[in-house]
């Protein structure tokens, strides 16, 4: 995996080729959590054609202030 201000390059689960995820979708996800308290994987897919919601969710789940869970899978502030 490599990260810069343009985005993140990661190996996919199928390991066929690296996937590049633009930084904008991370910004959108964080802004939605700050404004609305949560964002679902489905909403991420609606805003990002790269179909990277699983990678975005996995990465944001590592942020100590955020939690991931529920159905549909949702990223939200811990304790909300």
Image: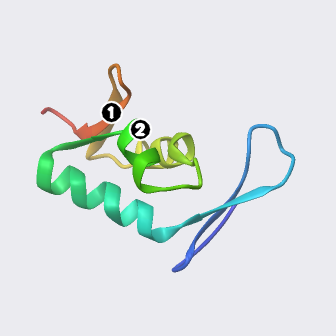
Horizontal arrangement in the rendering, residue 11 relative to residue 63 (left or right): right
**Dot 2, how many residues are within 10 Å of its Cα: few (below 14), some (14-19), or many (20+)?**
many
Q: List x then y, in percent, for residue 28.
A: 33, 61
Q: List x then y, in percent, for residue 29.
A: 33, 55
Name the residue rendered at 43%, 61% in the picture. 25
| The residue positioned farthest toward the bottom in the image shown | 5
Question: Above or below — where is 62 with respect to 18?
Answer: above
Secondary structure type for disc 1: strand
- Observer-nearest residue: 72 or 13? 72
- Observer-nearest residue: 36 or 42? 42
Q: List x then y, in percent, for residue 72.
A: 35, 24
Secondary structure type for disc 2: helix
Name the residue rendered at 46%, 42% in the picture. 57
Name the residue rendered at 50%, 44% in the picture. 53
Q: Are marks 2 and 1 in contact (CB under 8 Å)?
A: yes
| The residue positioned farthest toward the top in the image shown | 71
Question: Above or below — where is 7 with respect to 34?
Answer: below
In which quarter of the view is residue 19 placed? bottom right
Q: Which residue is mark 1?
A: 74
Q: Which residue is mark 2?
A: 41
**Quarter of the picture holding the C terminus:** top left
Horizontal arrangement in the rendering, residue 68 relative to residue 55 (left or right): left
**Quarter of the picture holding the N terminus:** bottom right
Name the residue rendered at 15%, 32% in the picture. 79
Coloring basis for residues: rainbow
**First along the sequence among labels 2 and 1:** 2
């Amino acid at each position: 995996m490599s990260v810069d201000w343009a985005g993140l390059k990661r190996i996919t689960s199928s390991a066929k080729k690296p996937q590049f995820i633009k930084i904008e979708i991370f910004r959108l996800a964080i802004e939605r959590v700050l404004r609305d308290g949560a964002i679902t994987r489905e909403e991420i897919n609606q805003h990002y054609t790269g179909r990277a919601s699983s990678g975005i969710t996995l990465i944001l789940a590592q942020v100590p202030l955020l939690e991931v869970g529920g159905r549909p899978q949702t990223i939200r502030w811990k304790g909300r």
